Image (cartoon, helix red, strand yellow):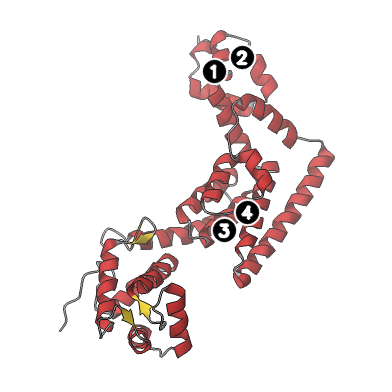
Amino acid sequence: MLRIEDIPEPVLTELAYALDPSDIARLACTCKSLSQIYSSNELWRSKCHHDFGNLFTVYQILTTAGLELDPTLEAKFAHEPANWRRYYIEKNAAVNGSENQNHALIEEGEEEYKKAQQDLQSFQDSQDVSILNRVASKMVWILDVFPGHAGCYHLLGFILYVLNRLEESIILLEFGRTVDPEYEPIDDLEEEISKILNGYKGSEDEEPLISDSNLSPKLTQVLSEIFDTFDKDNDGALSNQELGNFIFTTNGSHPPPQFLVQMAQRFGGTRRNWLTKEGFLAFYLEQTLDDPSETRNDLTVHGYDGHTLQKLMQE
């Protein structure tokens, strides 16, 4: 006959996930071993994450990515609580209000979610980073009340995608998939990010392009060789004519002079607005992070194997 003391701890943990605090307290009174398990701070921490999500990790990921969240969120999520059982009981009471309160909060949350979607659309036109800060803060606030809102995780993942924090974006998308495995937008965004990450790292037969968010040493070497090819006077910068020749060779277009000046001003140029090698590499870092396949195609045009980054034999 199986005694309650012989039930494996993982089973008891899963049982705790399904019970409310009062039921857990009653069960803990039945024997000493259960009392020890159910008084564990780590168990209550796991139950909090299971029932309410891990907003402490979400907060850390977002702020580490450079987002400036609502200051009131810092007080709530910058540091984990010392007593997880007390935190769970208080959080559970806050989330499970009256039916009328819950209905009003649901409507408010959905309205804020719709506004956040509109704000992200406006960001694509304005590139105002403060919009991302505001939307991210809204999403965390909604998740604090509605932990099962997969759409919030999707928008947070999209914000990190925009900021090119792709691996962190995947983490938040996985959080969203946990609360709603059927939410398709998460699958679509994760597939897009996976393609980009695979492009950075390359397949088994491909040389990686990115290393620690920078150009890989091999790609840096190849791009430096290409730069030197077009730097005819060997002065460490591409004049407007030299840069124009590079662009024409790369994609067959003759850019206007103002475009060449703006390119040097944006990525790094001399006083004469000629693109330096550092600026050239900075341009390719941005392009590669955005679309690694385009960089591989450029290398092929300039006589290198876009997969192995080796120089092709000239006929």
Amino acid type, residue under disc 1 in the picture:
Ile
Whichever of callouts 2 and 1 sits on the residue coming sooner in the sequence is: 2
Which residue is denoted by mark 4 in the rendering? Answer: 136
From the viewer's perspective, is residue 200 above or below residue 72? below
Q: As shown in the figure, which amino acid type bears the numbered disc 2?
A: Ala
- Label at residue 284: none
Q: CA distance from mark 4 to mark 2?
A: 40 Å
Circles 2 and 3, Cβ within 8 Å, touching? The answer is no
Horizontally, residue 171 falls left or right of residue 144, namely left
Q: Residue at x 66, y 47 (%)?
A: 71
Residue 206 at least partly seen: no
In the picture of the structure, the residue carrying the numbered disc 1 is: 37
Instruction: Residue 65: give x, y in percent of width and height.
Output: 52, 53
Q: Position of residue 148 (x, y in %)?
A: 64, 44
Seen in the picture, residue 7 relative to 143 is either above or below; the reply is: above
Distance, label 2 to label 1, CA atoms, is 8 Å
Image marks 4 and 3: residues in contact by CB distance under 8 Å: yes
Which is nearer the N-term, disc 4 or disc 3?
4
